[in-house]
Amino acid sequence: MSLRRPPLTGGEPHATGPAAATGPAAPTGPTPTPAVAPAVAPAAATAARPAAGPGVPPAPAPAPIVPAPIVPAPRHAVARRPVLRTTALVAFAAALAGCATQIPGEAVAGSLSPQIGPPLKTDTVSLRHDYEDSPQEVNDYWTEDRRRDADTKIVTPDDDPESSDTDGGTRPDAATGVVVDPSSGPVTDPTPVAPATAGDPFDATGLAASTQGRLYVTIGSDDYVCSATVVNAASQDVVATAAHCLWDFEGGTGWATNVFFVPADEDNGAVAPYGYWAAESAYGPQEFADNASTNSLGMVIGSGWTHDFAFLTMAPDDDGRRIQEVTGGQGIAFGGTVDDLLVTGYPAAAPFDGLDQRYCASDDWFVLQRGAFGIECAMTQGASGGGWLSDYDTVTGAGYLVATTSFRSPTELGAMPLGEDALALFTEAGGL
């Protein structure tokens, strides 16, 4: 399905199309320019990162989101995963602007994904947590030793064949068709990454070189690592990850603490070209908190795993700059159909060491349990929360985040599609 793209206008990202109303535009500041100051003075190793120009004035209040019509999901066979070949996420008619330059973009609606069914409703969609620790306190907590010794979270598929049946009540988040362009502008005629399954080092270019990174968190008394992605948001401070990276299943403490993000992390945070960033708030689905857990083997339990996604808002750096002013932001899509997929992350369990970003890519994805995207991929724990980008362009490094890594088997990764409830969280976090 090809869509005519409206003319580009100035302003922050805002959704259009069947699932959202267009909000007023806001002026943007100058394009960021390189500098050398870190976001917060590191407690151990330090590294330089580019800085931004004068800040961008806050965007006006966005118009309310109008729910999209729902496309019922077809029943998937319980047998070995069916391979789905679908149309491209969105075909745009506008030219692409370069690399990580901040260019105000117009969000455009994509077609609805047929594998995404009606939403699972709870009393409230979102669960919000505001952090009390200052960015400096979080930075001071993450010493070189703690970053090096942080563990990975083990999350594997369950062995219940009915969890592969989307007619059995475990449907993914509902499609909306809402698409927000990358901060560098719309992606058109992308040159995709060649299919790959080994988890080789990722040679990031353009926007991808600054927006994807490693997430450090404390759950209970233990430290963990995951992966995350900066996405284009009106508030310019939103990072996407997996809900399970931020949630305590065993100790009953709820949200993770000391949430610390390092874009383009290398060598356990010793190399941090875009600084160190602490979370101000976390936004997760109530459905996940109520109905997701794991057993002693790390197998997923409950219907809440259809909502394994979350958003963080990051505190500004010492100079008042917001993270997206420094890194740019990837596009994000809430229920668009998908052709090719690029998956990135920081796998840290053997045979990987978490010291650099890795990737897998596929133009032949399939459906796993609970309607998850699935691809063949050798990446291990630590890749959780990493971005699944569709329509990724190797030239500009820009694409559209459609999911975050949720679970893995010895040969496959799975991720839950973003949809209506994810859009509500994104909007509450300041995305629209």
Image: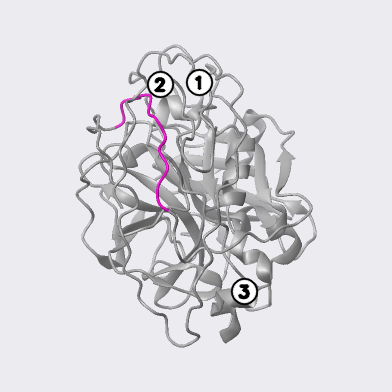
Q: Which residues are magenta?
A: 100-111
The percent coordinates of residue 15 (x first, y second) are 49, 35
Indicate the quadrant where residue 298 lies. bottom right
Tell me how far mark 2 sits from mark 1, CA to CA.
Answer: 8 Å
In the rendered image, which residue does mark 3 sit on? 298
SS assignment at label 1: loop
Q: Residue at x 67, y 32 (%)?
A: 137
- Above or below 427: residue 268: below
Toward the viewer: 412 or 351?
Answer: 412
- Taking the image as shown, residue 233 lies to the left or right of residue 303, namely left
The percent coordinates of residue 295 (x first, y second) are 68, 76
* Mark closest to the chain's N terminus, 2 or 1: 2
SS assignment at label 2: loop
Instruction: Considering the whole magenta stretch, tell me its main secondary structure.
Output: loop
The question of residue 108 being in magenta is answered with yes
The percent coordinates of residue 333 (x first, y second) are 45, 47
Amino acid on which disc 1 is placed: Arg
**Which mark, residue 51?**
2
